[in-house]
Amino acid sequence: MATRRDAFQPWRERWPPASYWMRVAAGVLVVIFIANMLVRIQNVLILLLVSLVLAIGFQPAVQSLMRRGLPRGVAVASIFLTGLAVVAGFLALVLPIVIREIAGLVAAAPGYLERAQQDSPLLADLDQRFNLVEGLQSLGRNLPTTVLSFVRSFTAFVFNTLTVVILTIYFATAMPGVRRAVAALLERDHREDFEVILEESIQRVGGYVLGQLTLGAIAGVTTFIALSLLGIPYAAALAFWVALTDLIPTVGALLGALVGVVVAAFVGLPQFIGTAAFFLVYQQVENYVIGPRVMRRAIDMSAAAVITAVLIGGSLAGFVGALLALPVAAIIKITVRELIVERRLARVREADAELEAEGQRKPASPKATRARGSKRSE
């Protein structure tokens, strides 16, 4: 009777009290507030993530110097002072040339286009439809404003770079302390998993960061030499672009080669063919000769996973997201493997072992006994 009476209670009595809905509303408001704050500080979070990935990536080099007797602080300072000297020297030599050649490229683009129109009816038709020459001339007239905007963007880039450098130095120096602090909060089993995940992440990300920097430098130097020999103008600017885009896995090489081939097309047909052939040959050499040697200790991921990670990272955070996609994906892969896949495989192996042990303890069935007897008689 009590159950039947409860079934006919008014819905108001079965409905959760008002305090429950107040807690639900408060939880929703907190989630919305946190999401709003994360959106507002996303640039800061990206800088922190970049610094953390770089700090992890430089750990193999730091550990190598420490094995030679240098303290951690001195090892970190040595690496960053060396990198700063190399970057400063490179910028002092290349940046004025790049700025001058970019300005010259913008100023000379209408002339290249007019010359190409005389040889190509297709370009003449495109110019009539889209006013390409007028657009390029307008871009040349607005070059001072464009340069000012570039200087502002470059200033913001320098500020963000300095922030990343400072945070990377801090993370790289404090990595052992952070490692001990996190491990102290974990139980023994979880602590072992954390140590395995962190150590393998350091090796993988470290190999990736150093490998990508090496590949970018090789691509930039090789491109500069090849374009200079082919007589392509603005070789320094194009080589700088190729070195920068080559840091992006999979699609970066295509982006770098595309700009070089387009510029060469405005110079002449032989230069166009030579530039296209150079990039085609170099990509094969990089993919099958240079890349495997440089990236031996880098991230172990399939081509489909690499492309998917780069696309997701680029859509979430643009150029920086594409650069960080593979290190973050590698860390996620290692974490999932250690915490989920390995434990699942261990449970499956234990279950199979128990089934085999039970099968050995059980007496053989009459059918199995007859089958063994028939095999002996044969």
Image (cartoon, helix red, strand yellow):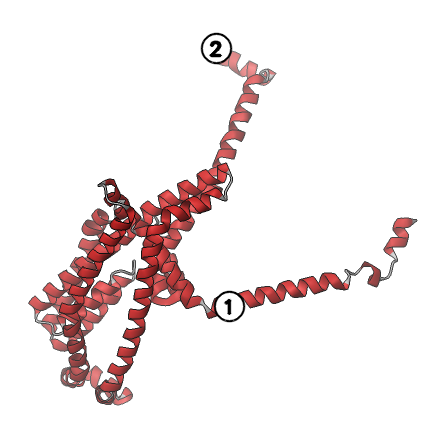
Q: Secondary structure at mark 1?
A: helix
1 or 2: tag closer to the N-terminus: 1
Q: Relative to 372, is 212 on the left or the right? A: left
Distance in Å between CA atoms under marks 1 and 2: 77 Å
Q: Relative to 52, is 112 on the left or the right? A: left
Q: Which residue is depicted at the point 29% across and 81% down?
A: 149
Find disc 2 in the rendering and name its residue.
Answer: 376
Q: Which residue is depicted at the point 33% across and 51% down?
A: 173
Q: Nearer the viewer, residue 26 or 110?
A: 26
Find disc 1 in the rendering and name its residue.
Answer: 37
Percent position of residue 308, x then y: 39, 57
Against 311, residue 333 (above or below) is: above
Percent position of residue 376, x then y: 48, 10
**Residue 326 visible from this viewpoint:** no
Q: Relative to 51, is 368 on the left or the right? A: right
- Extreme residue in the top direction: 377
Against 40, residue 73 (above or below) is: above
Q: Relative to 334, is 365 on the left or the right? A: right
Percent position of residue 193, x then y: 45, 40
